[in-house]
Amino acid sequence: MTELKLSESRDLTRIERIGAHSHIRGLGLDSSLEPRDVSEGMVGQAQARKAAGVILQMIKDGKIAGRAILLAGQPGTGKTAIAMGMAKSLGLETPFSMLSGSEIFSLEMSKTEALMQAFRKSIGVRIKEETEIIEGEVVEIQIDRPAVSGAASKTGKLTLKTTDMETVYDLGAKMIEALAKEKVQSGDVIAIDKASGKITKLGRSFSRSRDYDAMGPQTKFVQCPDGELQKRKEVVHSVTLHEIDVINSRTQGFLALFTGDTGEIRAEVREQIDTKVAEWREEGKAEIVPGVLFIDEVHMLDIECFSFLNRALENEMAPILVVATNRGITSIRGTNYKSPHGIPIDLLDRLLIITTQPYSEDEIRKILDIRCQEEDVEMSEDAKQLLTKIGHETSLRYAIHLITASALNCQKRKGMVVEVQDITRVYSLFLDVRRSTQYLMEYQKEYMFNEASIVDGGDGDAMHD
């Protein structure tokens, strides 16, 4: 019984989690930044995607820093999807960090410190370093083991060659151990870092490709290096400013990055790091890569955070700030004043605003097709039409939630394809916001702490809508 439980738990860990935006692969733009109809998981929102593509191109060219973009639109119109598309299009080299407006208030540090750390996570530093390496094909490895164990350490000789030369190197105990660890044998092409002694196996030489009748699929064949054995090679390390801050400010150094116990970092530490990075830039040892900081639900920030953002955007090492909100004219948190999107006018003036439009019925259908494919659900044409109608009349998110629920209902009746009856069944089981509100209005007197005055007069219509 115990063995069965263990195997079940192992299988569960292999299941890939499907998130709300796991189908997004990019912005779906062609080379001239024109949006394709359906591409890379993106559907519709042509204007917003094109605008995001222009911003993206400027980020890649390093033309802008300290700029801010606002994605504004109704709930469920693809604001977060556009931000995710931007992140995927930028690639791994450009830092991209995501933050929710409400996260800042639940961290064990001040609001401004949390924002500053988020800003520094979004600024990359590419540090260039020149190292000396020995690169060649292994001709022979001779290891002399002492006859009596413990009498003396192992010694040996390593013969390396390139197309132009061949050299014999004496080996110490550490190098012999490193070669054994990497399973290096004659015919392998290796690189040895002179400073650290690290050995990297690059592959097997083409000249030894006929040594064995059969090779594993992971065996990589490379050309024998040419020129001299000793070469100077430029190595590039990509880190964020926040990582440099943590390493220099905590007693446990880089281990704090794994434990998450970064705490508050003193301003003096940051100033010293900024000075050092500026020196490296002047010497050509490093270059700054302005990344992207995405703050979702930006209306949740208060007036102090907005004031900090105003100041932080003026810094010469500021990333591109992308914020998103689904609010209309609402109160600025921490004040009694109202403003569009709940953002102060002075910060709104700095923002390039991209708006998203509600999806048409045809676009909803295309999105549902993509989600069915992502969630591995087979659905009949009639069922898809009904689900599209539900999505158009209620909300896209509600329709997407019904996909997996209807697939489970289909499995229960031992069906292979989701039919209309499955959609109808889950539609009656799970309420959307409108039907739930109607139900509350009918039976709210039987609920605890009901406020009957809310549903009287005009407010009832507001809730109903």
Image: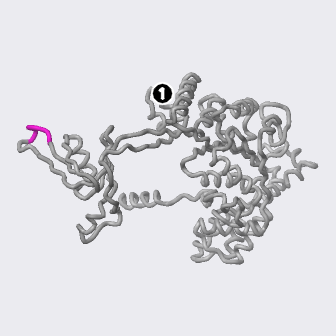
Q: In this picture, is 448 found above or below 379? A: above
Closer-to-camera residue (323/65): 65
Q: Which residue is mark 1?
A: 250
Residue lying furthest left in this view?
Answer: 147
Q: Quadrant of residue 331?
A: top right
User: Which amino acid type is shown beneath numbered disc 1?
Assistant: Arg
Residue neighbourhood size for the residue with mark 1, other residues' Cα within 10 Å, grouped as few (<14), some (14–19), many (≥20): some
Q: Quadrant of the C terminus?
A: bottom right
Residue at x 64% of width, y 65% of height: 371
Q: What residue span does the magenta drawing correspond to?
A: 149-154
Q: Is residue 353 above or below residue 123?
A: below
Q: Find residue 172 and report its image quarter.
A: top left
Q: Count all numbered tags in the image, as a single digit.
A: 1
Give the structural element (helix, strand or loop) at label 1: loop
Placement of the N terminus among the 4 image quadrants: bottom left
> Compared with residue 161, is residue 360 higher up or lower down, i.e. above or below?
below
Q: Nearer the viewer, residue 433 or 438?
A: 433
Judging depth in this view, the residue of 161 and 368 nearest the camera is 161
The x, y position of residue 362, in whole percent, is 76, 69
Side of 92 relative to 170 (left or right): right
Q: Is residue 337 left or right of residue 234?
A: right
| Left or right position of 128 against 34 | left
Where is residue 184? Give x, y as percent. 25, 53
Q: Verify whether residue 70 appears in magenta.
A: no
